[in-house]
Image (cartoon, helix red, strand yellow):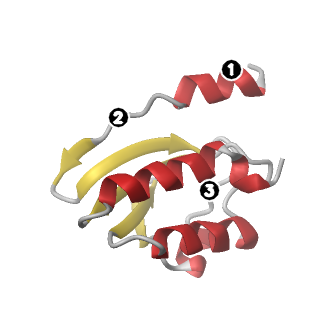
Amino acid sequence: MTPSDQNSSISASENTRSADGLQRTLTILNARGLHARASAKFVKCAEAFDAAITVSRDGHTVGGTSIMGLMMLGASPGSVVQLAGNGPDAITALDALEALINGRFGEE
């Protein structure tokens, strides 16, 4: 699968509702996964919105504003993560975070 095929397979996401709020499922595409720099960019983006963001992987959930928490998820390239958001800016926040992830955190 080429990188463009990977992008097209995940770019059309939908919001789903759950007890945790709006949710999206995304695939980590950058070469090093959720390492320190990528996690810091994620946190900076998440903090810009009036929304509570959580990130889950393999049954573990962390706050979207915790660099260490995000790194502890161990989300390597190709990992699937679930983002959830609550609050007035939840949709906008999830859109921005999805763009960041799909844009490979600006690394490649």
Q: Alpha-carbon distance for marks 3 and 2?
A: 21 Å
What distance separates the C-alpha of mark 2 from that of mark 1? 18 Å
Label 2: which residue?
14
Q: Is residue 28 left or right of residue 16?
A: right
Tag 2 near tag 1, CB within 8 Å? no
Task: Single out the residue that lies furthest toward the left.
Answer: 19
* Quadrant in the picture for the N terminus: top right
The tag earlier along the polypeptide, 3 or 1, is: 1
Residue 33 x %, y %: 70, 55
Q: Which residue is mark 3?
A: 75
Kind of residue at disc 3:
Ala
Q: Earlier in the sequence, mark 2 or mark 1?
A: 1
Res 102 → quadrant:
top right
Give the answer, above or below, for where 87 lies relative to 10: below
Which of pointers 3 and 2 indicates the residue nearer the eye? 2
Instruction: Tell me the crowding category of disc 3: few under 14, some 14 to 19, or many 20 or more residues within 10 angstroms, Cα based.
Output: many
Residue that appears at 76% across and 54% down? 106
**Residue 5: image tag:** 1
Number of labels in the image equals 3
Q: Which mark is residue 44?
A: none
> What amino acid does circle 2 point to?
Glu
- Residue 56 lies, in percent from the top left, at 42, 58
Disc 1 is placed on an element classified as helix
Q: Are marks 3 and 1 in contact (CB under 8 Å)?
A: no
Where in the figure is residue 41, as x and y percent of width and height? Answer: 65, 68
Under tag 2, what secondary structure?
loop
In the image, what residue occupies the spot 50% across and 54% down?
Answer: 96
Q: CA distance from mark 3 to mark 1?
A: 20 Å
Q: Is residue 69 above or below residue 94?
A: below
Q: Residue at x 53, y 31 (%)?
A: 11
